[in-house]
Amino acid sequence: MSIYCCNLSAVTKDSFEESSLKLYRQQFVISSALLAKKHIANQSTVSQQYAYFLEDLSAQTGTEIFYDLKIPDLLKVHSPTFQLIAGKKLIEYADAISAVKILAKIPLTHKYRAEALLYSGVGMLLSQKVQEADKFFFECTIVADDLARKEKNELSKRYYKIIEDRCVINRARSQYQLGQYENALVHYQQIDKRSFLWPYTLSEMAWSHLKLGNSNRALGLAVTYKSPLLESYFTPESELLMALAYKEKCLWKDADVVIQNFYNKVKPQSDRILQMITKLDASNSLFDEIRRRENLAQDSFIRSIATQISKKVKYNFAIILQEKIIKEIEKTTKSKLNHLTEALEQLKHSNLLHINQMIKESLVTHLNKINKTSLELFNVSIEILADQRDIEYTSKPTTEAKKRSRGSNKNIPVKMTEYFYTFDGAFWADELGDYSFGLASQCQQ
Amino acid sequence: MPTIGEKMKFLICGMFFISYSNASFSKEKISYEYKQYERFDLGNLEVDGQVIAPGDISVRQRARNRIKREIRQREDFLDLIKDEVKYQR
């Protein structure tokens, strides 16, 4: 999507400013936004009154349509929405200091204040200023909670809850980055199991347990992704975690089984993704293809990828925008505003390209994750061979081999705040996230 | 006029010179041929000396080479954070 997508000079003889206001009054909000963008790009400054109008307009169109404005153009508009977009873009360009300054201008009571704090924290974390980042995330949790309490609209409440959860997770990540794994786990445990972000925290919690040397807990968390409820989550890293946890316990055969299963399962999946990317690379029908396959029950792997993509906020905003454009095209066609219809058709095509690009990126990311994990598992298998050879060379022959035990409470350190459920091959919804293995280490002392 | 004795001297010198030059021009080309195959039976060779190596088969001890692969341990989640921000809005 680009502000240069549509030929708007033919749309109006008035100035872009006047035309955008006029179209807004006539309820053509998308068309109004197109002209407003032209006005912002053409002027050196934007009046405060027009900034207020843009704030209202963006509330109706969504922020997605303004995202292609350049940062200097965004900064011409003194409105929290445009400051939020500018701040987020600056973080993507790795200019955290400027981003934090701009985001700080968003008023305390504004609906985007919590999100601005989230971005500020992320900016600091990416600049390796972990302590400052933690402060932003902490403030974000308080502001998001406060805004959620005051909000009556259920959708808005959910939005604030997601922002709050993201800030809590990022606090946990900050602690992890500082090497405070116990503290990280305390933050992760604050995430409600009903939150859609909760399944993503399982692998991060497993890493924390692995770092603390509690590989039984790590194993229990990694294996949770195999439950039917979490089947749609594509997490190749959980396989790496399982292999590492088994390796820690010197259970090499089990680690080897995990590695072999991964290769057997993932190789055809990787081929299929590659096939999809190459087949659809030249066309723009990827979006339709994904949507069509999303409904196919038998194609569980592609359905799981589609589910993952549909959970991305930006993707949903783009879909909502597409629906709004289609509705407005119907209205302009009825009103015989042909020039506007033409401009909106161009915008529709441009937005579709944008959606397709997001899907392609997502598929490539999946593929890269598979390849990365494959390489890492290969390294683990080499290390396992080396470990076994070490034992052969260095260990004294023992008359009694350790008796293999597959689970005992003695092998699991349990804290007051932690639950413990043994995993007996069946998953129970309320027990998810609290499974632990009780395997004894087979490493010779 | 040279005397008979002087003529004889001259004749003898001339004959000596002619016979020498003939001998030098008629020298044959000698080609040396080396032995094309020779078999050594090392088992039958006897060498005088003292045996200092151990009699049985031995391997010289050396440090064992351990294959070391770098296994990734997550130190941060920055890759995930970047991805989340990208698709947040």
Image (cartoon, coloured by chain):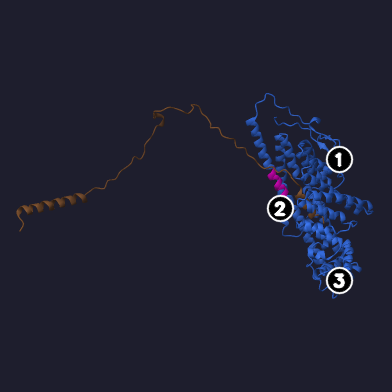
In the picture of the structure, the residue carrying the numbered disc 2 is A275
Give the residue type that dot 1 points to: Ala
Left/right placement of residue B41 relative to residue A204 reads: left
Q: Residue at x 64, y 30 (%)?
A: A394
* Chain hosting mark 1: A
Task: Tell if the residue under mark 3 belongs to the same chain as the one under mark 2.
Answer: yes
In the picture of the structure, the residue carrying the numbered disc 3 is A17
In the picture of the structure, the residue carrying the numbered disc 1 is A429
Q: Secondary structure at mark 2?
A: helix
**Cβ–Cβ below 8 Å for labels 3 and 2?**
no
* The chain coloured brown in the image: B
Give the residues drawn in magenta, as a range: A367-376
* Chain hosting mark 3: A
Q: Residue at x 72, y 50 (%)?
A: A367
Does residue A375 sit above or below A287 in this rendering? above
Instruction: Tell me the CA gap for discs 1 and 2.
Output: 35 Å
What x and y, as percent, mark residue A15? 85, 74
* Mark closest to the chain's N terminus, 3 or 2: 3
